[in-house]
Image (spheres, rainbow, N blue to C red):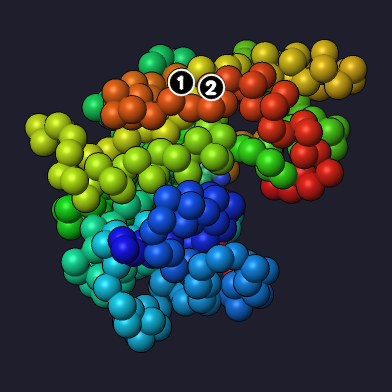
Amino acid sequence: MSRILIAGCGYVGAATADVFQQQGWEVEGWTASPESAAELSGKPFQIRAVDITDYAAVKDAAVKPFDAVIQSASSRGGGADAYRQVYLAGSRNLIAAFPRGPLLLTSSTSVYAQSSGEWVTESSPAEPERETGRILREAEELVLAAGGTVARLAGIYGPGRSALLRKFLAGNAVLDAAGPRVINQAHRNDIAAALFLLVQQLLAGLGNSAERPIYNVADGHPITDRDCYEWLAAHLRRPMPPTVDAPAPRKRGDSSKRVSSEKLRACGWTPRYPTFAAAMRDSILPNLECLGA
Ligand SMILES: NC(=O)c1ccc[n+]([C@@H]2O[C@H](COP(=O)([O-])OP(=O)(O)OC[C@H]3O[C@@H](n4cnc5c(N)ncnc54)[C@H](OP(=O)(O)O)[C@@H]3O)[C@@H](O)[C@H]2O)c1
């Protein structure tokens, strides 16, 4: 039986663990805290609290070999220091402790700083303006140099999670008077399916060897924030958010681009939720009661 370690068994990691488990893999999931591990104790696979920023802890926990390791831990909204710890030190520790299991890192499409609404592919410049983005790029290079794969995730949403919807419902949403911003999203379940596919591909040595194993994971139907809010306003029968002159800066930067996922689609990935409307209608609005971050 193939074995996978999901280091960072959170919103995306737990859904990904479910996919691997359903496909007959033996799964082990790690969280940072014992509390999060306890919350997942009902899962049909092993969950442990192991801090990936602590090499001794990772080494101690690395008792069994894995066929592959997914590093999907998040900085939980932290700044540059947290990024250095979780993404850089975390990836380095996992590579050192599991030299045989190739690593798949969940990075972010925020590494593309493009701001004119242009399409970006994996070969477009990825030159983030913020320090956090530059640290993420460093972690990506570390993983690629070790023979791993990088999945650049767009804004994650799904059951219980949509930052846009949460802001809209709380009355905190605003539109920028300077014009709409193009945003890119991916449904949690589609991300989990993509990570499963990429691990299989990594293990089979598939893919175009002339290209670096970097894959954008986005639904491929970018949408402006204005269009999202218009959809929500119409479907929830609520007023549009106000337009303001200088909205607060966004954590992941002020980029505005259209992220292509053609490379991943060419590998056989077809998102179940290819648009904002499909995800909202079929998955997120029916699960409104647990809307979190
Ligand atoms: N949010 C977005 O829209 C977005 C967009 C692009 C990319 N991403 C990336 O996608 C990945 C998955 O995000 P997510 O939303 O699923 O994250 P999440 O829900 O915040 O879950 C993160 C998981 O990582 C664990 N973790 C954090 N630090 C750890 C450590 N030092 N050692 C071991 N485990 C640790 C957490 O455990 P605890 O619960 O115990 O803290 C939690 O289980 C992350 O890499 C994130 O940066 C996110």
- Tell me the quarter of the picture where residue 270 sits: top left
Q: Position of residue 135 (x, y in %)?
A: 36, 52
Ligand 1 near label 1 (Cβ, under 8 Å)? Answer: no
How crowded pointer 2 is (Cα within 10 Å; few <14, some 14-19, many 20+) is rated as some
Q: Which residue matches tag 1?
A: 220
Q: Quadrant of the N terminus?
A: bottom left
Could one spot residue 47 in this view of the protein?
yes
Q: CA distance from mark 1 to mark 2?
A: 7 Å
Observer-nearest of 262 and 269: 269
Q: Is residue 134 above or below residue 99?
A: above
Q: Which residue matches tag 2?
A: 274
- Tell me the quarter of the picture where residue 173 sits: top right
Q: Is residue 277 above or below residue 91?
A: above
Task: Give the left or right position of residue 258, taking residue 135 as reference.
Answer: right
Are the two marked residues, 1 and 2, in contact with CB atoms closer than 8 angstroms?
yes
Label 2 sits on a secondary structure element that is loop
Furthest residue in direction left, as rendered: 210
The amino acid type of the residue labelled 2 equals Pro
The amino acid type of the residue labelled 1 equals Gly
Residue at the image point whose x is 53% and y is 32% from the top:
186
Q: Position of residue 110 (x, y in %)?
A: 45, 37
Residue at the image point whose x is 29% and y is 67% from the top:
66
Label 1 sits on a secondary structure element that is loop
Residue at the image point whose x is 28% and y is 46% from the top:
200
Q: Position of residue 32 (x, y in %)?
A: 53, 72
How crowded pointer 1 is (Cα within 10 Å; few <14, some 14-19, many 20+) is rated as many
Q: Is residue 169 above or below residue 63?
A: above
Observer-nearest of 150 and 124: 150
- Badge number at residue 179: none
Q: Position of residue 25 (x, y in %)?
A: 39, 59
Could one spot residue 83 in this view of the protein?
no
The mark nearer the N terminus, 1 or 2, is 1
